[in-house]
Each structure stands twice: as C-alpha cells, then as structure tokens.
Image (tube, grey):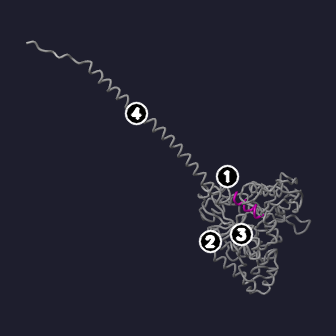
Amino acid sequence: MKREVTPRRTGAARPSLIRGLFGVVLVASVMNFLFVFLKCEDEVGGQLKKKLEQFSTKKSVHVAHQATGDGTNQKEVSKAKATIAYAVSVTGCAAASDNLVQGAAVLGHSVRLSSIENPSSGSKYNYHLIAFVHPQAKACSHLFEKLGYEVLIRETPINVSDIRNEVYRADIAKQSCCGEKEFIKLYSYTLTDYPVVVHLDLDSVVLKPFDDLFDSMIDGPSAPARKRIPVMPGSPMPDAVHAFFTRDYNMVNLGHKHPGMQGGFLVVKPNTEYFEEYRELILEGNFKAGAGWNGTYGGYFGAKQIQGLCSYFFDGVHPNTAVELNRCFYNQMGDNPRKSRKHDEKLMCLDGREECEDCRVTNISEIMSAHFTSPCGKPWECSQKSRNVNGELCHSLRRKWFSIRNNLEHSGRIRGHTPTTGEGTFLPETYFGYCKGPGSRNLIPLKLT
C-alpha cells in the first residue's frame, strides 16, 4: 500500500517569523520612545524645577528686601559667629537734629560695610545699632530709628541729688556739653543679649572689621587674634579681656601718670555688676578737685565724666581687665604725640616713652576706625586741605567718610530716601559733590524726611 506523504508547509513559517520580528522591532521602538520621552521629561522637569527654585529664591530675596529695606545678604548673616551691639548716645536734640544725624547715618553705614552683611569685608560678625537716648532728646529719636538704630530711652543712671560728695554734686552738671547725662554711655554694660558692645561717638567712623577684638573677648586666651591686635607698649593682654579702649594723651600734661580714657571709643563685655559698681562710684563721688578720682585719676578735661571715671575703673578698681589699644590704628584722631614744656625744649612723647609713633603719618589702609575730634575737625565742616603734618591723613579720612556717605546715599538703606544731588564743586575728589565751599554752612546734607 502506497504511503501518503503530507507535503511540508514551508510557506506557513515565514509569516510567523515576520510577525515575530515585527513584534520585537515594535517593542524596541516603544521602549526607545519611552526612554527618550522619560529623558526629555526629566530634563524638562529638571529645568522647570530649576526655574521654580530660581523664582522661589528671587521671591524670598525680594521678601527679605521688603522686610529689611536693603540688600542684606541673609544667607551670609545666618552664618554669623555672633551679633555685636554698636551703640551711640544722644543727650539732646539741639545737636542731634543737624550735623550729628549726618554722623549717625555715616557711622551706622560704616558698621554695616565692616560686618558680615558685606561679604567683601571678610567679617564673621553681624551687628545691631542701638541709640541710648536721654528723655530730653526723645523728640528727635525718630531720626535715629529711620537710620536703623534701635532707640532705647534712658535716664541718667544716677540721680545727681543722691551724690554724697557735695562739691562733686555741684560740679558734675556743669561739665562739658552734657554734664551727668554723658553717663548714659554706661548702659553699654547692660546689653547682656550681646557678647560685646562697641560704644562710639557720633563723629566716628569704622573703616575695617573689629573681628580680632571680638575674637579675643569671646574665645579667650587661646584666640590667635590676640597676637594680631596692636596694643600700647606696656598694656598686657589678660586671660579675660573685659574692655578695649584708647587714651587721650593730648588732654594731659607731660609725665601724667594716669591719662584719661578717650570717651569716644569703648569696647566692653556687658556686665550688670560692673554697671552697678560704676553707679556706686558716681554716687560716692570720691573726686578731689585738681587730683581726680580717689585723689589720683584726674587733672584733665572730662576727668569728672566718662574719661576720668573709666580710667579709674580700668586702672584702679579692676586692674588687668582692660587693654589699651594703639590709637594710631583704633580711634585714630590724627593728633600730635609729642609736646615740650617750653618752646626751646626737645619734644617729648606725651605717653611718657622715649620714642613713640607719630599717628599723623599712619597709612590709612591700616586704620581700623577714626574719630573726628579737634586735630582733624568734623567731616561736615568741609575743610580745606591743611599743610600741617596731619593734613594728608585728615584729608584722606574725610574722603573715606564722604565715600561711605555716597555709598549710603545710593544703597537704598534709608526707606523713602531720595539720593542727594551732589552738585557741590568744592574739592569734589574728596567731598563727592556734597560741599559747595569751605565751612559747615556749605555742606549739602543727607536729607531725612
């Protein structure tokens, strides 16, 4: 019987193979599409996320600017090692309503420029501006608030009628510009929310950060900064520094053993016990005419006030707790370091040394802060350049002051302030157009409304 042979169905295998290959290609295409899609989505999403973050950052910065009224670098400020209080004292409105307000504006801005808010300063510290305002100056305190100062209304820390020394009680109210009201500077010791307080007169300016001083007070004897601080020869650095100060040698006669502290510059650690000790010293009034506190610390202008009281406190009551800084670098005044008893005698150093630095020729790039007292005069006096030894330094310091004022005018720091038009033609390279001629009457003032 013949076997029936079933033919091989070779043609049927080809469609199946084609369908299989098509499926593989389709799956691969879909996977490739999904890969490309997801990648694009990730890139677009990342870009979108980045845009949103940028928008969020801009918005938060804008909000920060609205809150502070300036270009404060909040991120940098948040990294600050500590916040330092910078205080001034205002005892009356007659002076505060004019040129000293100009001083307060520039001083406050100079502090900002030397703080962590200004990254180029290199400072690690934030700042807070405070104005101790006597009740008699309350009417003009709003001007200081407008400039960014926290205003603290403070009575004189003692009642003059309670001073037990009758002679001192009668004399203190007659002293200098403000009598016993100058003692409101002592409230610096009560600001215990801050590790350090810097009290400056309104005719001062900060030129470089005080970080070395702050590190030395906060970090103690191990602070490397202690080796960098320019102190006066013979002024040791104690383990615990409670104050930094400078002296005013131009107010004393040659050979004076205890010169007064310069009242426009004081850096202290807040200490309420010290504050009470100061109060008790004033109330005791152990001041002898012509001789000074405890019969030793006096004999110069301001001896009955802060200048003499602090000298007595640092040298007599609490010795080896405060450090005298080199006044060529801190609280620089451009003063003559030498004097002679007679016109034909050799000039001698006022601080009692054989040789002494002449602060009048200090390189301005090394100066930490300046104080515009009588040697250089006030910056708002629009002075001519002097040919005296200190002429170049004083002129350079005025240029620094007006440079800071110019920066403030265009910084947007003062809310509602329109920059003053610098139309003055008197020494424009120094006064930046803010002086029309020599003399304070020719100052074009910074306007506060």
Instruction: Give the mark nearest the N terminus, 1 or 3.
Output: 1
Per the model, the C-alpha gap separating discs 2 and 1 is 29 Å
Q: In which quarter of the image is residue 72?
A: bottom right
**Circle 4 sits on which residue?**
30
Residue at left offset 71%, top offset 58%: 413
How far from the left and from the top, in percent, is residue 121? 68, 54
Q: What stretch is highlighted in magenta?
A: 103-113
Q: In the image, 444: left or right of 193?
A: right
The disc labelled 4 sits on which kind of residue?
Val
Instruction: Give the mark nearest the N terminus, 2 or 4.
Output: 4
The disc labelled 2 sits on which kind of residue?
Thr
Residue 120: mark: 1
**Circle 3 sits on which residue?**
131
**Circle 2 sits on which residue?**
192
Residue at left offset 68%, top offset 77%: 317
Q: Does the magenta stretch include residue 109?
A: yes
Instruction: Give the mark nearest the N terminus, 2 or 1.
Output: 1
Looking at the rendered image, the quarter that the C terminus falls into is: bottom right
Q: How crowded is mark 3: few (under 14 residues within 10 Å), some or many (20 or more)?
A: many
